[in-house]
Image: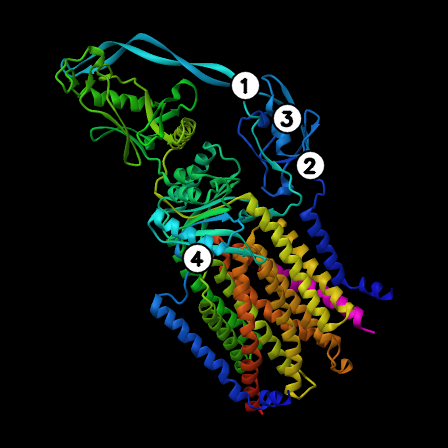
Amino acid sequence: MSKIKTLFKSWKIWLLIVFLIFAIVQISPRFNSQGVLVLSVEENSSAMLAGMGNPLSDKYSKLEQVLEIDDIPIIDEQDYYAQLADIQVDDVIKIKTDKDVYFLEAQPNYIIVNYTNVTSEEIFEEFDNLTNSTINITRNITKSIPNRELNGTKDVGLVVMKTPSTNVKKGLDISGGARLLVKPESPVDEETMEMIRTNLDNRLNGLGLKDVDVRTVNDLLKNQYIMITIAGKSNQDVLDLVENQGKFEAKIGDNIVYSGDNNDIINVCRTGDCAYIEGCYQTQDENYLCRFRFAITISDNGAARFGELTNDLDVVSVDDFGNVLDANERYLDSKLELLLDDEVIEALNIQASLKGNRYANQVSISGSGSGKTIELAKEDTLNEMLKLQTILSTGSIPVKLEIVNYEEVSSVLGDEFLTNALYVGLFAILTVALIVSLRYRSFKITLPMIITMLSELLILLGFAVFMNWQIDLVAIAGIIVAIGTGVDDQIVITDEIVSKEDIVAIGWKEKMKRAFFIIFGSYLTTIVAMFPLLIAGAGLIKGFALTTMAGVTIGVLITRQAFAAMVEVILKD
Amino acid sequence: MTKIKQIYEKKYRLLLWIPIILFVLSIAQIGYQQYTTGSFAEKDLSLKGGYFVKIPYELDQDANQYAVDLEAKLIEKLNRDVEVTTITTLGRVDAIQIETEIFDDVGTINQHIVDITGIKQEQFLSQGIVNASLGESFFKETFRAIVIAFIVMAIVVFVYFRNFGPSMAIVTAALFDIVMTMAVFNLMGYKLSTAAISAFLMLIGYSVDTDILLSTKVLKQKKSTDINENIYAAMRTGLTMTITTIGALTVAFFVANSFVIQQIMTVLLIGLTIDIMNTWIMNVSILRMYLERKK
């Protein structure tokens, strides 16, 4: 009993206790994890208007937790979506979080159902080359006015995930998801890199992917990369979106009419009557093919350039077979070519009536998709359309990107890995305990060793949460290695203490000094050896170095000190 | 036993030749590998580049035969080199990995895998692309990193002990560990991965631990004058350290279902086993010679 008292007189023990409390607070295990965490809030959504804001940090502990919707408790994501499924316009949704109560007004969702064409006569001033004077010309202008119809309510604008049972963040290979590492084909400055990053972020969001993280990273050879992490399942579309530069141009002959770089695309139609599937048919190899078509709105400058360039073109009034065409069938002798990344995606005949028209600001773009059944073909076509729409509306990336690494892990595998990692840790600790029990045959030594090992694990995890690190497989390997080094040091300490050498001659202090000389030496060498890994390989295996370095540091500064104090008190008579 | 003890205590100059010969043989192995293949170790997909798919395996039939058949079918369909390997957890094959060096048409590759195995794409456990350029630059930079880490480690040791002979012994032991581990790794037919390289870096730190222990015990012992007693005391501690670590790593190796963890454990296991010889034969011999000269 008196020994326990002496134990608590040591500041080393108190230091350990303080850090253990810190770790538990950081990890904050939740035994009944309720609700969903808000990962982000969409701009101008009803949630944002009601006062919900984007989290300041992506640490789990800093995220707002949705507990109830309309007084009904929310357990997980399914509950959350189910509760919001039947919202009607003008409904007020009460969302209770761990921080506040919000009242969200459901916003109506309108879609374009069709267009009304309005033709009007308008007078334009134009310079006439023949008379060298400004003349007034009357033209018939047709404008398409979209008709909108109410279609349910908009999403409230929250991206959520189930509240995890601890604050420890799982890495990609444990939580499941996809990670891409892309590299510009030629070096670019930091500003361009940031621009590419923003653009990719917008594109992936445009694709409807939630919880996407896009960041820039460098490595030891000063290579620049962009790392994209997507929670949940990704698909081939992501690769396409990243690989497409998205350089959009429209040309008549060699002249550029509009280009994405001049901000000539002011709107890309996504829904309703101006974005649709035109029709499907069966191909010779028994697959189905569908075509999509959607409209884009061109800037006034672009439309004016179209007018200028078409003015000089001749009207084709006789077709290839020598038949004279009707007035409304006539077209111009050059086509309007639409190019994406220097490849022609569409070559449109220009109606003769559009000649010199400076106000044609709608252009339709088409494409196709295919599949084994008509449903699959339609799905693929809509997907292709969404991709093209996203690329056109987010603008181009100034340099071609190369995918250097792509990894996708299913969440099933991730769960297996996690359970397995826990077993690995448990069995490793048991093995160590068994070996030291055999060697020392004393509970008084084995017990403090096990306590120290577990404390190290706990403090290391707490520190990882504090630093907002993700624990992936290499990080787990790092934890095992760090704890392994910890055991080594405890053996050094124990052997110094129990050695038969005359205690009176050398003294506890001297023995400890020598033990810590050995421990500190191996600590320093481990740290310097791990250092390069922090930035090598674009940080893909950084987790290993981080956890090892943090683990051995925690060991040397906190847990080994406490272990020395414990053993000293227990063994000293 | 006493005979062995006698040899160990007296014939240390002769014993020193064991690690030296093994070191030379290891250099020869690595040199041969470099000469015949152009690289001192065979690289795996994470360093060489390529495309991989990991699919679950739940059939009752012989997994190895299944892998061989699948490989043959895929090579025929895709008309390119494909490698199919089995992944074992706790002695049971529970997944199959398909690798190919070319990844221009991932969609087609996946489709063929789905057609042959009947496993839907949604059920794929994982898949990934590594561009050869990333693998190459990673290999280059980590190789540089290993050299830098080694030099800095050596500086730390020299500054820490401020004693040329014993410091040199520690650094040489670490060098021998790494070179011999590389050679054994090659001989066992393993391929080098990014994870394995990080384990080699860790080995630099791990392998000097017992050497530092030994040198401290022998050089800083004040009362005791018998060098053998100090060496045996250090050995008791050092071997306990190594055995607990090897025990934990072995368990981790067999229980882990992750290839990444298994690779890291493999490198460390080979390295620590070799370290037993390099510390307790080579380092001890050099220390004895150093102390002899000092007398």
Q: Which mark is residue A83?
A: 3
A526 sits left or right of B38 in the view: right
- Give the foreground label among 4 and 1: 1
Mark 4–mark 3 Cα distance, whole angstroms, equals: 49 Å
The quadrant of the picture occupied by the N terminus of chain A is: bottom right
Mark 1–mark 2 Cα distance, whole angstroms, equals: 29 Å
On what subunit does the disc labeled 3 rest?
A
How crowded pointer 1 is (Cα within 10 Å; few <14, some 14-19, many 20+) is rated as some
The residue tagged with tag 2: helix, strand or loop? loop
On what subunit does the disc labeled 4 rest?
A
- The residue that label 4 is drawn on is A220
Viewer-nearest residue: A513 or A336? A336
How crowded pointer 2 is (Cα within 10 Å; few <14, some 14-19, many 20+) is rated as some
Question: What residue is drawn where x is 74% and y is 64%?
Answer: A448
Up-down relation of residue B173 to residue A55 (above or below): below
Q: Quadrant of residue B231?
A: bottom right
- Work out whether mark 4 precedes mark 1 in sequence or the reverse, and give the earlier one: 1
Residue B22 appears in view: yes
Mark 2–mark 3 Cα distance, whole angstroms, equals: 15 Å
The residue tagged with tag 1: helix, strand or loop? strand
**Residue B9 place in picture, x, y as percent:** 60, 88
